[in-house]
Image (cartoon, helix red, strand yellow):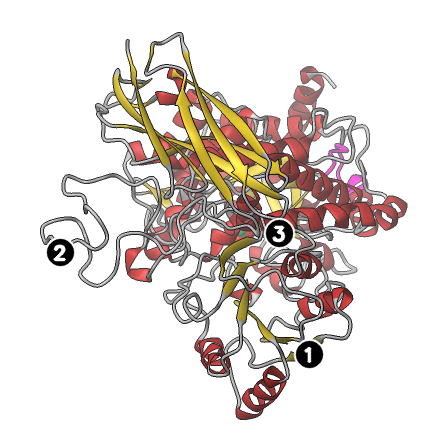
Amino acid sequence: MSRQRLEHYLEQMTLDEKIAQLLQLAAPFYDEVGDEGQITGPMESLGITVETVHNVGSVLGVSGAEKVISVQQSHMKNNKHGIPLLFMADIVHGYKTIFPIPLAMGCSWDIKLAERSAEIAAREAAVSGIHVTFAPMADLVRDPRWGRVMESTGEDPYLNSLFARAMVRGFQGSDLKNDKERVASCVKHFAAYGLAEGGRDYNTVDLSERQLREYYLPAYKAALDEGAELIMTSFNTIDGIPASGNRRLMRDLLRGEWGFEGVTISDWAAIKEMIPHGVAEDEREAALKAIIAGVDIDMMTSSYVHYLAQLVADGIVDEALIDEAVMRVLQLKEKLGLFEEPLRGADVVAEREIIYCEEHRKVAKELALKSCVLLKNNDVLPLNKNQKVAVIGPFALSGDILGNWSWNGSTELTKNLAESMKVISPSNIIIAEGCSIDKITEPQIHEAIKVALKADILVLALGESSEMSGEASSRSNIKLPEAQLQLVQFMKQLDKPMVVVLFNGRPLDLHGVYEEANAVLEAWFPGSEGGVAVAELLYGAANPSGRLSMSFPYAVGQIPVYYNHFNTGRPKPSEDTTEKYVTHYLDIPNAPLLPFGYGLSYTSFTYKDLVLSSNEINETDSLQIKVKITNEGKLSGVETVQLYIRDVSGEVVRPMKELKAFRKVELAPGQSREITFEITEEHLRYYHSDFSFTSDSGRFELFVGPNSRDTMNAAFRLKK
Ligand code: BGC
């Protein structure tokens, strides 16, 4: 359909009809329109008319082909222009086949598999009638107290950008119009939502332009460069102005500097929330600020539908601003082929065949296998099928391992850990609950001790319930709940080898667990096939290969603690220094417990012969970096070889290390491989004091290793 055709629609519409295109309603609306056409239930409080509902542009959270078809069909009857509804939803880590949470996926460092997971999520969502997913979440996070850390791929701008791009490719494919098994992608939450002060959700964000551009913006930009069709505002302020009314962010930077032409949408009620933020007296002022800033769709408030028309009539808002926003919404509908096929991919038969099919679950399992991170292993893993294993803890028999944003997932269908271990070792698994997530009783303790005493080895299945991370689920104490720490203490007294498997949504403070256990496997919320995957990892049917995409703090008092920090003018020479006037804490180390990039395997790898092709490059050369990796153990395994760089004399201070490249290599026992990386001047660029993105001549340090801490070093010079 040509642009003229879309403009024709625009010309036919009244101002009110146009503004209704900019409203997004949530699913309950479609259950709350009474027989007489009146709106009932909680949705009545929005105070909108049925006439508005008939002209609404998009809906959020309605899914299932049958329901979508019926809502769309009745909408098409009621909308006099024949403009179809857009169906949007949060398909963040799967629709019904649930993949590991994004933070876990980040730990896979497997970009291709992430893309495939998004493709599958899109496929299941599309046959269920969804057109747009509110994903990927590209927020960089350095604070594990923030509950939404589970939705992020971690603390590194480079890795986050790779994942953001992969997710967009997977969701959208290359032809949204003809490929009806893809959905449009809405990257969120623009911008810097992950920096909420104190890790408290919805809290103030305040950062320098340098921090914003260097760390927080790259992953959103990467998603847009990959073609994401939409972007969602964040709830927070940026430089004192809420994102949804932030003209510099939404219009000058996003549209002007980056040239983004897709749809912008507020987060849930974020336009109206400019009132409590303290930048709008009322909804009228909030609507005015949002439309001027360039927010196209108002998610779930009636600020636009109630006030924009009057603002136009009063000559305060130029109708051209509204036309521009409506045009973008119509263009998105057109790109998705909705004018020709309002039902698009919604298909009751395909839904039955595709959703949660074996092929999809296989990929979910593969990603779960690659996302788990072995944090410690004092020779107790892998388990042996002949060992009597006591599986104890609240996650032994729990299907609550899908994580947040699994609203279509089924915990009943999900195989739990103990059940999955029994498949591998049918007669040697004994089970006790031990405690619930946050309570422990005498009978539970007795039962756990009784069961544990019969076993050769204990597997404690511990963690956070899925409700303990995600939106509005920040925690100040990020240790395991006290009841579980007590269970660890009781079990420790039995003097049996003890493995801890963790199911959780954030890097935890592992005091009370890490020292006590002989092995720790971080499983995160591993999704639909997570129980099966973890069981296979425990028994060595698969070898752990995940690497942390976010540091695990030594203690909450260190937060934010991240690998790409500055050195300061008084660096601490070593963790056991007695020097006073250096940057340090009196009571805890500076370093996190476990650094970015860290993860163990059942085999061991050595790094040798780090060789650079030259000790100097110029603007046109490239530098080859070679290193030899050997699998010294008895099992095949995958190593993630990481390359970091430091500019030691930037015009602006540069981080101690910055991830520039990595390579996953699979090696058989005894096998060696030479890995080659290539670095050019482009890798050395950053934002200077005038915000030019350039490099400095001079000395650079280069690090290669299995994580951001344990590296081999070399150096070279850039000559310009
Ligand atoms: C969340 C978004 C989500 C939206 C729609 C909001 O509360 O912040 O991430 O996309 O709801 O469900």
**Residue type, numbered disc 2:** Thr
Give 196 or 268, whichever is nearer the viewer.
196
Instruction: Give the number of the disc on residue 100.
Output: 3
Left or right of 623 on screen, residue 700? left
Identify the residue position indicated by label 2 in the image.
Answer: 578
Q: Nearer the viewer, mark 2 or mark 3?
A: 2
- The answer to whether 623 is drawn above or below residue 528 in the figure is above
- The answer to whether 509 is drawn above or below residue 579 in the figure is below
Give 20 or 414, whichever is nearer the viewer.
414
How crowded pointer 2 is (Cα within 10 Å; few <14, some 14-19, many 20+) is rated as few
Confirm or deny contact between disc 1 and disc 2 (CB under 8 A). Answer: no
Q: Secondary structure at mark 1?
A: strand
Q: Secondary structure at mark 3?
A: loop
Placement of the N terminus among the 4 image quadrants: top right
Q: Nearer the viewer, mark 1 or mark 3?
A: 1
**Residue type, numbered disc 3:** Pro
> Residue 634 in the image: x percent, y percent?
61, 48
How crowded pointer 1 is (Cα within 10 Å; few <14, some 14-19, many 20+) is rated as some
Instruction: Give the number of the disc on residue 430.
Output: 1
> Residue 372 in the image: x percent, y percent?
58, 53
**Residue type, numbered disc 1:** Ile
**Residue at image location 90% in from the left, 46% down from the top:** 349
